[in-house]
Image: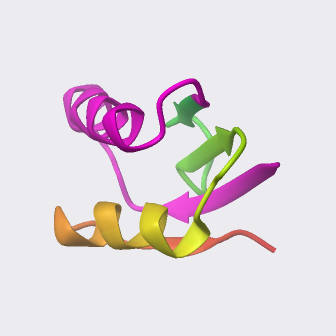
Amino acid sequence: MIEVFKTNVQEFTEAQKLLALLRRHFPGSKINFDLDDCDKVLRVEGHNLKIEKVMTLIKQKGFVCNVLD
């Protein structure tokens, strides 16, 4: 399963912290940010992916995170 999210993450250091958090919750998944994209895209690919959990984790850290249509 692959899911793409629109975020408001701006800084590389913020993205690195969020990636570490997400990788702890979704081990074995491929997760990355594209901060050069206007939507500050977060892409998550993996089995047992829980969309709501991804959004909750990001939002708990104070960022916007919504599924990109």
Region rendered in magenta = 1-30
Residue 23 lies in the magenta stretch: yes
Please name the residue shown 50% across and 37% down the image: 35
Against 29, residue 43 (above or below) is below
State left or right for residue 45 relative to residue 30: right
Please name the residue shown 44% across and 68% down the image: 53
Q: Position of residue 12 (x, y in %)?
A: 30, 27
Nearest the viewer among 35 and 52 is: 52
Nearest the viewer among 2 and 40 is: 2
Against 56, residue 39 (above or below) is above
Q: Quadrant of the C terminus?
A: bottom right
State left or right for residue 14 relative to residue 50: left
Against 11, residue 60 (above or below) is below
Please name the residue shown 29% across and 27% down the image: 16
Residue 22 lies in the magenta stretch: yes
Query: Image quadrant of residue 57?
Result: bottom left
Nearest the viewer among 39 and 68 is: 68
Q: Position of residue 9 (x, y in %)?
A: 35, 51
Q: Position of residue 65 (x, y in %)?
A: 46, 69
Query: Image quadrant of residue 5?
Result: bottom right
